Image (spheres, rainbow, N blue to C red):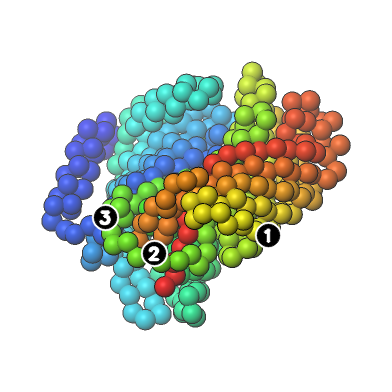
Amino acid sequence: MRKNYRTSIVLLLILLVGTSAVSANIESLTVGSNNDWYTMGLGYNHDDGLSYGSLVEAVFSSSFTLSLSSGGYTDRIDTMQRYDVTALVASYPLQHQLFTFIPRLGLVASGNLAFDEAQNFLHSLIGRDPVNLSYTTEESTLHPLIGARTSFGSRKGGMRYSFELDLDYAHNWEQAYSGNLRLQFDSFLSVRLGYVIKSTNHSCPVHKEMVDRYQGPFLSYHYDGGLLQTQFISYLETGRSFGGFSFDVLSLWKEKQFRSADFVFSTGFLYDLNGQQNRLFAFSYKTVSFEIRHKNGPMFNNMEDQNDRLNVGSWLLGYSWNIPVTPQFEPYGKLLAGVQRFNLQKDFINTIVESLHPTIAVEIGLKGLGIPGWIIERQNYRLRFTSTLQYIFGTDEVSDDDTYFAEHTGPWLLMTGIVIDVEHDRE
């Protein structure tokens, strides 16, 4: 079965998706992109391993699900090789009160699927070094896949507690077994904490290396904001992570039901004085918020050496107050306090800085920006402009380790950016 299957795989996918779209009622159609730069401040950011990927998923009115996922794997540390993976998987849930069983069948294509061209094109656009690694094979191979998820749980109010077991077997490629606890908050947020074991009988050395990197204890979440969705997983033992954004394009045509905000999910991009992008993820209930801000990658003030990579994160609790002017122009202020993490690695594997510090911050901004909210089902999307001045305690010793990194450690940090607030109506 070793030959180039790219053309036949593409034709098969077009046929399956096209036939399904015509013959069935699609409830949601999600398109998304993932990258290892979503760390939430945890672990490391090497731009290596499972570095980038994409997802297209269709859920039909019968609950039948068809998903197409892809990922590019690179190893710039050991084997200096790469490979690509694409998986087409169909699944259908069988439910009975507290028990759910979801069998799945599919195909996995591995090898040279030309994802290196997409990666290096994107790197050229954003000023990153190209990743010039040879493929472990110039061919692509198909592997039939069978798997299932079993879930036992109960619901109490708006929260569901469950225990899940997963099994996936891709012939002559990879096997994965996992178990996890899952907390589901209404229909918008699920959090998993579990353990996954992977193995392979494939002869590809770089694949064996990737199997070792992406197993062990993990923490993940999935957020569903109607149109906007985000997902993230962190492998806690190896420090690897992966996450991104996706959009349910069919939500744009669903009934608008939003009346008032019970809680708010926020995401956006804040930029410091070096031009480094900080990604914001936050949940707010009334005046109280929990916020994660993180930045990673090569230092913008030292782009000549992109193998020196930072991973900086803060986990904060906030208290805010609004100054009502009009519904579309609403100034606000916020006080925050929490923990700041600094991590710096040279040449991917040498840790130069690893430290935690208490931090406080003050934030001011403007909600609405004069633009009416955009209602998607039970969510209301609003824009917000924000500026944050942050102080980090005890950074003197950190700043001595690297002169370029010192510009990212403060102790004073100023960040400004645009945020999307997704207001949720639970009723």
Circle nearer the N terminus (2, 1): 2
Three-letter amino acid code at disc 1? Tyr
- Identified at 23% across, 37% down, the residue is 10
Task: Tell me if label 3 and label 1 are in contact, CB under 8 Å.
Answer: no
Quadrant position of residue 355? top right
Residue denoted by label 1: 319
Three-letter amino acid code at disc 3? Trp
Horizontal side of 344 relative to 372 (left or right) equals: right
Residue denoted by label 2: 258
Q: Give the Cα separation between the discs numbered 2 and 1.
A: 25 Å
Task: Tell me if label 2 and label 1 are in contact, CB under 8 Å.
Answer: no
Indicate the position of residue 370 as horizontal and vertical percent values.
47, 46
- Identified at 62% across, 38% down, the residue is 416
Say which quadrant the C terminus sits in: bottom left
Indicate the position of residue 305 as horizontal and vertical percent values.
65, 21
Indicate the position of residue 105 as horizontal and vertical percent values.
29, 56
- Identified at 44% across, 70% down, the residue is 426
